[in-house]
Image (tube, rainbow, N blue to C red):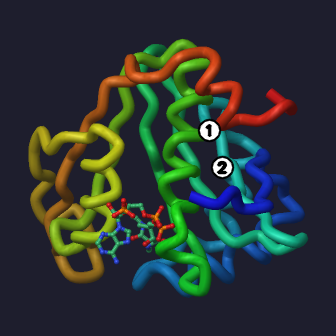
Amino acid sequence: MERLPIEFRPMTLGDIPAVLQVEQASFTTPWTRQAFYNELAYNQFAQYMVVEKEGRVIGYCGMWLILNEAHITNIAIHPDYRGRGIGEMMIDGMMALAREAGADSMTLEVRVSNAIAQQLYRKKGFEMTGIRPRYYTDNQEDAMIMWAKLDGGSDEADREVLGAGY
Ligand SMILES: CC(C)(COP(=O)(O)OP(=O)(O)OC[C@H]1O[C@@H](n2cnc3c(N)ncnc32)[C@H](O)[C@@H]1OP(=O)(O)O)[C@@H](O)C(=O)NCCC(=O)NCCS
């Protein structure tokens, strides 16, 4: 695929307004400004990244890194930029960062109705391990719990994904 001129970098407090736009365009119960602020300012286990194209934040992803496990908390790509491989690139980047931090597995929850995200996760090696009944409070929808092993990468491939800054 043609390389996109996009940057993958840590989210800052200044990114929150742009991140909220993507969040609100992506979810029925979007996270609030305060939720992102708390994650960035106070959660020592959290790592949030954005993808930026021509100065515009077009996607983001966050995870909690706890010992050898990485837990994806949130991922979204702006609707105008979906279907171009950027979500996959973000997952590759998060997996590389998690491996670098010593994690050997990654988990997440996804709505049982979110077939597109599930497709992306399966492509990246996630498998369903269980269900959290009525996990989503807006419509009582179940969450699918997915796990992936992080042993697929090499140092060289990870450096390529993360770029020179890492
Ligand atoms: C899920 C999401 C992040 C994917 O981002 P994206 O940049 O559009 O995805 P990519 O273009 O990198 O696609 C990667 C893979 O995802 C799957 N995928 C993406 N769009 C798809 C679609 N419309 N239909 C089916 N599968 C799709 C495919 O497996 C695809 O690989 P392929 O191109 O080889 O078929 C994006 O759709 C999004 O932001 N959705 C709203 C927020 C959300 O649901 N987040 C997940 C919460 S758990």
Disc 2 C-beta below 8 A from ligand 1: no
What element does badge 1 sit on?
A: strand
Q: Amino acid at mark 2?
A: Glu
Q: Is residue 42 above or below residue 103?
A: below
| Residue contact at pointers 2 and 1, CB within 8 angstroms | yes
> Could you say where residue 58 lies in the image, as x and y percent from the top left?
69, 72
Q: Amino acid at mark 1?
A: Ala
Nearer the N terminus, badge 2 or badge 1?
2
Q: Is residue 165 above or below residue 30?
A: above
Residue farthest to the front, as pictured = 2
Label disc, if present, on residue 133 of the rendered structure: none
What element does badge 2 sit on?
A: helix
**Residue at x-position 47% and y-position 74%:** 83
Q: Residue 94's quadrant in the figure? A: top right
Query: Mark 1 sits on what residue?
Result: 46
State ligand 1's quadrant. bottom left
Q: Residues within 10 Å of mark 2 (few under 14, many from 20)?
A: some
Q: Nearer the viewer, residue 150 or 42?
A: 150
Query: Mark 2 sits on what residue?
Result: 39
Disc 1 C-beta below 8 A from ligand 1: no
Q: Is residue 75 left or right of residue 149?
A: right
**Residue at x-position 85% and y-position 31%:** 164
